[in-house]
Image (tube, rainbow, N blue to C red):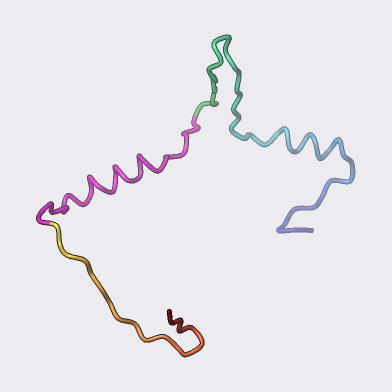
Amino acid sequence: MIRGYEAPHDILDYIALLSSQSKPTASMEYTDSGDMDIQLSEGVTPDKNIDEELQELYLQTGKFIIGEELGEYVQEVELPEHQQRFR
């Protein structure tokens, strides 16, 4: 028994169990012009892409300040001897 579920003894029982669980489905077809037509079942929302997430973050902040370009930033870091390289 795993997580309160007893495995069915027959493969047909297992298939019936899987088909009785409602899972969102999707189908995909190519049109004659080569485009892809994707159909999603009701209640399914596509994942956000990175452009949508960045746009959302940009709109939430509203604190970007555009001003003069600053000079190059240099930081000196001390390395352990085994990581040091000399030219």
Is 54 situated above or below 4? above
Q: Is residue 27 magenta?
A: no
Residue 14, by quadrant, is top right
Which quarter shows the C terminus? bottom left
* Front in this rendered view, residue 32 or 29: 32
Residue 65 location (% of width, % of height)? 13, 54
Foreground: 12 or 55?
55
Q: Residue furthest bottom?
A: 81
Going by the image, does 66 lie left or right of 84? left
Residue occupying image coordinates x 32% and y 46%? 54
| Quadrant assignment, res 36 | top right
Q: Residue at x 42, y 40 (%)?
A: 49
Q: Residue furthest top?
A: 32
Q: Say left or right for 55 vs 26.
A: left
The residue stretch that appears in magenta: 43-68
Q: How many marks?
A: 0
Quadrant of the snapshot with the N terminus: bottom right
